[in-house]
Image: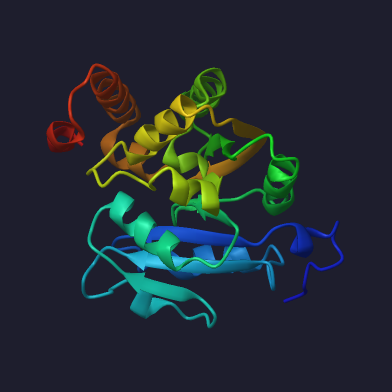
Amino acid sequence: MAGLGGRRGLSERCKFSIVVPVLHEERGINAFIRHIYSMDVDGICEIIVVDGDPSGSTVEKIDYGGVRTVVAGRGRARQMNAGAATARGRVLLFIHADTRLPGCALTKMSDALEDGQYVGGAFDLAIGSDRFLLKVVSSLASLRSRLTAVPYGDQAIFLRKDYFDTIGRFKDIPLMEDVELMRRVKKRGGKICIIPERVTTSSRRWDEEGVLFCTLRNWALIISYYLGISPERLKRFY
């Protein structure tokens, strides 16, 4: 892979740790890693795959050298914290294995963090489908995150590592860990940058559960969480 040392000084400006929480992603993990490597990340990024299966069923299928692997307790918050604890980069990027970054992602993240105005950010969202309803869902999700400055995990959240450690990392809850963290950032006065370029996430959830059901269920969970219902109770309906 070609290095990025001469590309706008990116390697000097920022070093990224890409933290990927997985559970039974054996079929897709190598495609995800191939996608990251296709972005010419040599020397400026590390990939940390954190498996929530105690047997390491996903990480044992990785065909690529240089990928760091961790086996942690099940739960995205716990897994992402475990990956962040081993990270050597100055910026943490938390991303799902069924999500793809835009080609300019590293440069855009570096630009957003360069002047110190922002503590982190995320991307606008696209869903990998031509279905009209899913285009509406992704557009509404992007608009919501811009209005609230509270992006969700499928938008590829990134944060300065020192800031992430200072605020106490993800809270160990069964879901809504992304929302809880972003609300905590806002409460502390941290500014989040929503990058207009889109990450593309798989449509498999909506395809399997039905677009209407999946969307309404997600909205109901978010509203319930904001009304004070605990993530432990909400987990029963997820």
Q: Is 185 situated left or right of 79 in this image? A: right
- Number of residue marks: 0
Residue 214 figure quarter: top left
The relative height of residue 79 versus residue 220 in the rendered view (above or below) is below
Q: How is the image coloured?
A: rainbow
Residue 205 % position (x, y)? 34, 42
Residue 139 % position (x, y)? 54, 24
The relative height of residue 138 versus residue 119 in the rendered view (above or below) is above
Residue 175 % position (x, y)? 26, 40
Q: Toward the viewer: 35 or 45? A: 45
Q: Is 91 situated left or right of 204 in this image? A: right
Question: Residue at 55% across / 31% down in the picture?
Answer: 190
Q: Toward the viewer: 143 or 112? A: 112
The quadrant in which the N terminus is found is bottom right
Question: Residue at 29% across / 55% down in the picture?
Answer: 78
Residue 161 seen anywhere in this rendered image of the structure: yes
Q: Is 187 situated left or right of 207 in this image? A: right
Residue 202 seen anywhere in this rendered image of the structure: no
Question: Residue at 77% across / 72% down in the picture?
Answer: 3
The relative height of residue 150 versus residue 162 in the rendered view (above or below) is above
Residue 224 figure quarter: top left
The quadrant in which the C terminus is found is top left
